[in-house]
Image (cartoon, grey):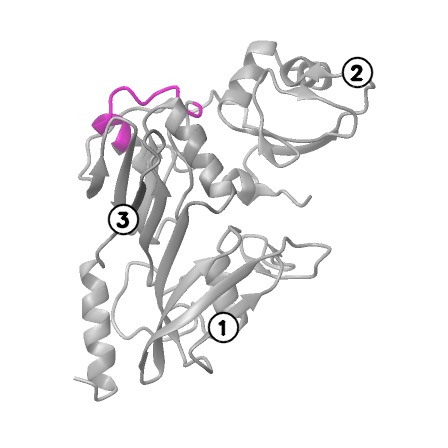
Amino acid sequence: MNLDWQEFEFGEGEGELVQLIYTKPLPMRLDRWLVSQRKEQSRSRIQKIIEAGFVRVNGIVGRSKTPLRNGDEVHLWMPPPDPLPYLKPQEMELDVLFEDDQLIVINKTSGLTVHPAPGNRDGTLVNGVLFHCSDLPGINGKLRPGIVHRLDKDTTGCIVIAKTQKALLSLQEQIQKRVASRQYLAVVHGAPKGEEGIMIGPIGRHPVDRKKYAVVSDASGRHARTNWSLVERIGDYSLLKFKLDTGRTHQIRVHCSHFGHPIVGDPVYSRCRKLPIDLPGQALHAFQLGLNHPINKKRMIFEAPFPDYWERLLVVLRNRAGLE
């Protein structure tokens, strides 16, 4: 198992990431065992860290009462010495696509981080949702209340947030079992051969630049598979649709760059490419989200309209290619 900083969604160098193996013959509660391993920490501090989602057992977010068994692998992210960030509601404009008493679906804008992290403690989507939904705190920990999945800071589009614990568990299971479907659109450099295909390559930390990800060896990365199909050829650019079979950090961005078609405007994986117009980030949009309602099980499909700058980008590209 190759968990690293991005699995915990915190910046490298912030805090401490510890890997531990449980070797006792009898089961033991996660919080009690961690106190025995980190004697400088109080039990209440360890419980707060677990509650915040900073501990994983065999790759799954742990709870204080999670029973450990011989051979279990535990990853613990120890925050810096300063107190855990206190999450405050903040008023902000949210593009709500759907809302009921169980969940809320939002069309996230570019430049908006999903939840707080060291160096980015407020002004996140979670801050705005907490203001919008006053009863959200306590669902999935204090720093990520209601968060089921996330989008990169500059990726736009559909994101669902649970408003009850029952909805959270249902949506998490749907994400893990691929019952929930997520489709993306991106404008990329170049023109892939054919009308559709599959990008396969294990993803892990870049061997040189540790702030980036890359397609790496099987031993140092995690299996990643991205399905793509051509929507439109636009001269030296293409509009592609993506559906993920796996959910790795920066997966679409890394695969597109690795296979020679980086996403237009990507500040990390396409930084040397000239931009057709000024963009706030990569032209990657989570345009469709499908899920079963946590209570009535009805299938629901949500679609998020393009940001305005997408329309400007496509018009410029089509004009350059003589298509308009």
**Which residue, given by chain and number where applicable, does mark 3 sit on?**
302
Which amino acid type is marked by label 2? Leu
Residue neighbourhood size for the residue with mark 3, other residues' Cα within 10 Å, grouped as few (<14), some (14–19), many (≥20): some
For marks 3 and 1, give the CA distance: 25 Å
Indicate yes or no whether the magenta region holds residue 261. Answer: no
Q: Do the residues labelled 1 and 2 touch (CB within 8 Å)?
A: no
**Mark 3 / mark 2, whichever is N-terminal:** 2
**Mark 1 / mark 2, whichever is N-terminal:** 2
Indicate yes or no whether the magenta region holds residue 133. Answer: yes
Which amino acid type is marked by label 3? Phe
Q: What secondary structure do most residues of the magenta stretch adopt?
A: loop
**Which residue, given by chain and number where applicable, does mark 2 sit on?**
26
Q: What stretch is highlighted in magenta?
A: 129-141
Asked whether the viewer can see residue 319, the reply is yes
Residue neighbourhood size for the residue with mark 1, other residues' Cα within 10 Å, grouped as few (<14), some (14–19), many (≥20): some
Residue 84, image x, y percentages: 46, 22
- Residue 318 lies left or right of residue 236; in this view the side is left
Q: Which residue sits at x=34%, y=63%?
A: 185
**Mark 3 / mark 1, whichever is N-terminal:** 1
Q: In which quarter of the image is the C terminus?
A: bottom left
Residue 8, image x, y percentages: 53, 38
Secondary-structure class at tag 1: strand
Residue 91, image x, y percentages: 19, 31
Secondary-structure class at tag 2: loop
For marks 3 and 2, give the CA distance: 47 Å
